[in-house]
Amino acid sequence: MSGLASLWAGPAGGPAATWGLALFLALLGGLAVSAAGGRRPAPEAGGLGARTARFAEGAVPAAAAGLVAFHLLLLGYDLAGVDWRRRTLAAGLAALAAAAALAAWRVRRAARADVPPELEPPADPPGWADGVALLCLGVFAAAASSLRATIPDFVYHWGLKAKRYHLAGGIDWAWLADPLALTEHPDYPSLVPGLYAATAHLRGYFDERALLAWSVVFFALCVLAARRALAAGAGGRAVRRAGLALVAAALATFGVGYEMAGSADWLLALAVLAALPALLAPGHAAEPAAGGDPAAGDLEVGLAAALAAGAKIEGVALAALLVAARLARPGGPAGGPWRGRLRRLPRLALPPALVVGPWLAGNLRHGLFQPDNTGSWDAARIEVVARAVVEALGTAEWYGLPWLLLALPALLAVRRTRAAGAVVALQLAFYLGVYLTAPVDTRLYVLSSFPRLLFQLLPGLLVALVALLAPPAAEVVAPRLKGSQLSGGKAPVSN
Amino acid sequence: MPPLQPTDRTGAREPGRRGPRRERAVLALLLAALAWVGYGLAVETLGLRQALAARAAGADPARGVIASWQPGDPGPRRLERFLDVLEYYLPDGARVAVVAPGKPAGEEHFTALWAAYFLPRQRIPPRAGALGPEGTDPPVDYVISWELPVDDPRLVEVLRHPDGGLYRVER
């Protein structure tokens, strides 16, 4: 026992605590997603490897749901005046898990025998790319644990906020609004500092290694989300594996080289990747045309949007784009395209709305929005921004990958990848719009932020490009359609 | 109900010669990109290893540039130890300016940011020049000077330390 205690107290104890909390949140989220889906779980197809892979891929929406639920719990405590302490957090988590388990059990019990469970084609069994991804994850985990790959913003912003929230036992609004205190983004959403502060409470003290381990968790989720998105949108197992290995290597290379441990940008990259299966899939089970349940895809995109909106201020824009892109996809329940889309709106928009609402209200109440977030249009900035953007695209730690943005028109030209391409293109346009209007040193602003902002989009762009270059050649229209779904669905899109 | 039996995850593949050839080309492209990015990962990992080796040997991987400090580096560890001593004299919520005499404004700014991280109980304006110009009433209660002492008639020395000093603003 004393050996275990010393292990827990040592450097490995911090990441272990984080992974423990992450697994608990994924379990909690998995139960919640299962309950919200209202369907019996699918009988697993394929061998042990494929079943394991399917289970691991399912961790993406589950973890997203768990993280969003935990964030909402923290916001709820803040609103109710309940301190964030180890005891209150443990009680809240236990209550959430019990509620999710009860809801999932009731849904399972009520599932009608004549409604077939959601079937999906078997997952790719683990292969060499998963080994490469594990290696990349290990390299990044070691780098994060050494503290020498920590993003400066962890000290200046995320970690500092987390320390204040840890001391205050909640969001320290007075400190955020104090002109003598924080100057770095007091108006940003609180998912990341809240998660860090809560981890510090559960760990017992402010352990930097434990907090930086969240980036390793997000790395793992990004890889699983990319695996899932490639499975949904790209043809050819060998291509999918090479694509997955490339995404993992790109994440690790930039993560180590540009020192991304502790950054909130991981969550935005994860949000894009997690939404891709529903945005890319030509005949994915989430599309009614393929006989699946559109609500499942909607919920996944809604959770991804909520993650983005809770992580960073630009994530609110990304959340809106993800919801709009999903809503623009063909398909929906019976009742015509617009009525169908309106009916889907709650599942899609409710999770991000629950996150954005309290953030917006808190910011307005305490006057936190910064005057230098945006300004007036200045044409003189165009040349400065253009030069700086080109310079940032050549950031050494990216090894040329940002130039893949030049392929965006190709994504937009093909119907199947248009939604994903539009999300990336419009989010990019949002960044450029801010650069062109923000009343700050424009060149410095672009050079210090654009390489990181690319990190939010490039993993998703890579996956979308693989899906573009290696499309699934034919669609399976599953022979398990329900009549109501058939009537509302369009023919599968294949371009 | 007939079983769903796709040949792969996304659906059955239509027969045709163009498909496999295209797939092989895409695979080659992806493997080439993977080799290139893998080389990049090796380069970055080597750079990190060298920085860690330098740190383990007691050298400063940031080469004295405060903007390049990372948690665990000798520079921030020295600052943290210094601030740990000063914290005893600083009430919670005190307004504290951090100055770095002889250093450029940028370095002073980053010193203040690190100090704010190490002293979360105090209110530290994380920017250079927070003390205000001489002859004006400083908008703070205390001043921390990093490395060199500060000479300002508005300040009374509270503590002198090899890594700097702590001063109280006299009103």
Image (tube, coloured by chain):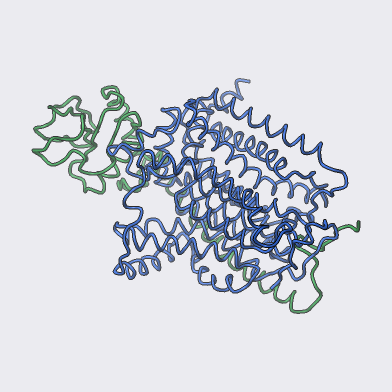
Chain colours: A blue, B green
Quadrant assignment, res B168: top left
For the C terminus of chain B, the image quarter is top left
Q: Position of residue A55 (x, y in %)?
A: 73, 46
Q: Is residue A391 visible?
A: yes
Extreme residue toward the top, this view:
A2
Question: Compared with residue A1, is residue A50 higher up or lower down, i.e. above or below?
Answer: below
- Residue plotted at (53% across, 62% down): A424
Question: Compared with residue B59, is residue B44 higher up or lower down, i.e. above or below?
Answer: below
Q: Position of residue A357 (x, y in %)?
A: 49, 43
Quadrant assignment, res B142: top left
Q: Nearer the viewer, residue A103 or A162?
A: A103
Left or right position of B4 against B117 = right
Question: Compared with residue A313, is residue B147 higher up or lower down, i.e. above or below?
Answer: above
For the N terminus of chain B, the image quarter is bottom right
Extreme residue toward the bottom, this view:
B17
- Residue plotted at (53% across, 26% down): A9
Left or right position of B94 against B45 = left
- Residue plotted at (35% across, 33% down): A174
Left or right position of A486 against B129 = right
